[in-house]
Amino acid sequence: MKNGLPENLADVTIPVVNVPDHPTRLELPAQEKAALKERIKSMLQAKNAVLVAHYYTDGELQDLAEETGGCVADSLEMARFGTEHPAQTLVVAGVRFMGETSKILNNEKRVLMPDLGATCSLDEGCPAALFSEFCDRYPEHTVVVYANTSAEVKARSHWVVTSGIALPIIKHLAERGEKILWGPDRHLGRYVQSLTGVEMILWPGSCVVHEAFKAEALAEMRKLHPQAAVLVHPESPQDIVDQADVVGSTTALIEAVSRLPHPEFIVATDAGIFNKMRQLAPDKILLGAPTAGEGATCRSCARCPWMEMNTLERLANALETGAGEIEVAPELAARARIPIQRMLDFAKTLKK
Ligand code: 13P
Ligand code: SF4
């Protein structure tokens, strides 16, 4: 450890990320909302479009995706679904890297997003030029990046991973004797490192939502709920992961709520995930892990401000006007596709 940080944390100064305020939500009267949903459904059909939503988006939007033959999934499955579905337009409700990944994998399809301003603190904290310069200092290292990055950063990497597949990919690379440079999430990187024993150089990025969970407050909460299992997304800091019964991707955490016998769960990830958890395990008590306590800013409060930009109104507007179309230059897409495709091909070998 050096100044309280691991030795292998990259000595780069990353940009301070400007976190938007949580949008004030105006609840539409029930009749208007029902009419809006019907309009979205007809437009999806008329435009040969399918809705692909992340588990952190608004519950109503998630339900609409499923009702209309689309999907609600983690970032790995969202990427896969888009490649396998025949629709000509993919409407990606999530954050920008998810839309870009869909476009990179489906260059012939139109990819729309409700709000192109929906970014991610990991993506923002890893500018391509700075990252590329850093990678140049380690020419003998394999560059592995988390999916939460721009197309340019992906194009500079050898492998893309999501939280759902990071562990087996890093193990695979280590078995081949490769040295690894990991970016941009230092918490996920540290977690993968601790389980695999593989030393990696870590880019110092982080997720503003998961970093807001507070260890002491969580310990107090556990005392008050001794029957609860603690579910943690690995973008969380070490002192939160240390208290977990299950650490995993959004899909793994949802699956844990159905599988485990516990009557209660304390969940350290974005609260949007409760929609699917409630559907699958209506009898279980679900509690959000605390983000209050010393140092709390409540800039996140377990709600990703960028995921919140996905509203029904903006979704309707994107379908109606074609606003929010994702463009990735074909040459860039071709380079970024290589490490993403590597991940998808590797995922297939695990399924066999
Ligand atoms: P998953 O890949 O687990 O869906 O996570 C994506 C994400 O952005 C978590 O904050
Ligand atoms: Fe990015 Fe964190 Fe939001 Fe996920 S929750 S999209 S990692 S800022």
Image: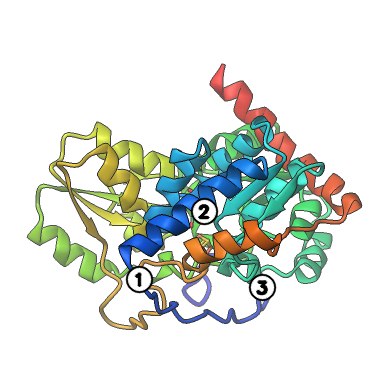
Q: Marks 1 and 2, Cα distance to the nearest angstrom?
A: 17 Å
Image point (21%, 70%), residue name: 217
The location of residue 83, given as percent across then percent down, is 68, 35
Q: What residue is pinned by disc 2?
A: 39
Amino acid type of disc 3? Asp
Count neighbours of disc 3 (C-alpha within 10 A) and say few if under 14, some if 14 to 19, many if 20 or more.
few
Residue neighbourhood size for the residue with mark 2, other residues' Cα within 10 Å, grouped as few (<14), some (14–19), many (≥20) = some
At a point 32% along the width and 50% down the height, the residue shown is 275
Whichever of callouts 1 and 2 sits on the residue coming sooner in the sequence is 1
Percent position (x, y) of residue 85? 64, 32
User: Can you identify the residue that label 3 sits on?
Assistant: 11
Q: Is residue 136 above or below residue 16?
A: above
Q: Residues within 10 Å of mark 1 (few under 14, many from 20)?
A: few
Tell which of 281 and 152 is nearer to you: 281
The quarter of the picture where residue 277 lies is: top left
Image: 52 above or below 135: above
Q: Give whichever of discs 3 and 2 has the lower sequence position.
A: 3
Quadrant of the rendered image containing residue 314 = bottom right
Question: Mark 3 falls on what kind of element?
Answer: loop
Does 293 sit left or right of 98 as displayed? Answer: left
Which x, y percent locates residue 250? 42, 46
Task: Tell me which amino acid carries mark 1.
Answer: Glu
**Badge 1 is on which residue?**
27
Q: Nearer the viewer, mark 1 or mark 3?
A: 1
- Residue 223: numbered disc: none
Quadrant, the C terminus: top right
Q: Is residue 268 visible?
A: yes
**Dot in front, 1 or 2:** 2
Q: CA distance from mark 3 to mark 2?
A: 51 Å
Residue 95 appears at what percent x and percent y? Answer: 58, 60
Tag 3 and tag 2, C-beta contact below 8 Å = no
Q: What kind of residue is marked 2? A: Arg
